[in-house]
Image: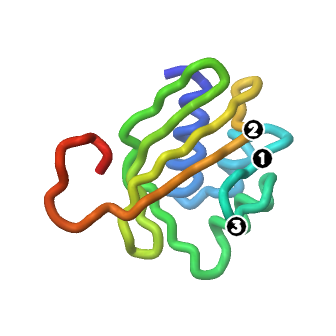
Amino acid sequence: MSQKLANATALYLEGIRDGNVRAAVEAYTGARYTQHSTGVADGVEGFVEFMEGPGKAVIYKNVFKLIGQGDLIVSYSLVNVDGYDMARFDLFRVADGLIVEHWDNSEPVPDGPQPNTGKF
């Protein structure tokens, strides 16, 4: 696994799953970290405030796929947000091996059996 893929994985697994948010975001993001997620401010403090703020309960359950090409990484994962399983897509831009920009999208995993599309 390349360093940029390892850093993207570690940001979420070490930082969010294992509860080391500040240490992970400081280790795996660049000096300038731009966040394109609604409600999350840029930089280390914005990420930490969102993840550790009151009423937040985000658990990364599994990273299914990581794809890296050039300075971009895409991850597909399953997260639990406030008790609801969500299929998640993250896009990272990397510079010098560190994450410098992030976009994401999530949607609820429907109840019941799902077609084998790899999405859920």
Question: Label 3, on which residue?
Answer: 39
Q: Is residue 111 left or right of residue 79?
A: left
Task: Count every numbered label the image shows and give the total.
Answer: 3
| Label 2 Cα neighbours within 10 Å, binned few <14 / some 14-19 / many ≥20 | many
Q: Is residue 55 left or right of residue 42?
A: left
Sequence-wise, the earlier of marks 1 and 2 is 1
Residue drawn at the location 46% of the way across and 32% of the way down: 66
Question: Label 1, on which residue?
Answer: 34
Quick one: SS at disc 3?
loop
Vertical placement of 2 versus 15: above or below? above
Residue 100 got which mark?
A: 2
Cα gap from disc 3 to disc 1, whole angstroms: 13 Å
Q: Is residue 90 left or right of residue 97?
A: left
The spot of residue 82 in percent (x, y) is: 46, 75
Proximity of marks 1 and 2: CB atoms separated by less than 8 Å? yes
The spot of residue 90 in percent (x, y) is: 54, 44
Residue drawn at the location 67% of the way across and 44% of the way down: 102
Give the amino acid type for the residue marked by disc 3 in the picture. Answer: Gly
Give the amino acid type for the residue marked by disc 2 in the picture. Answer: Val
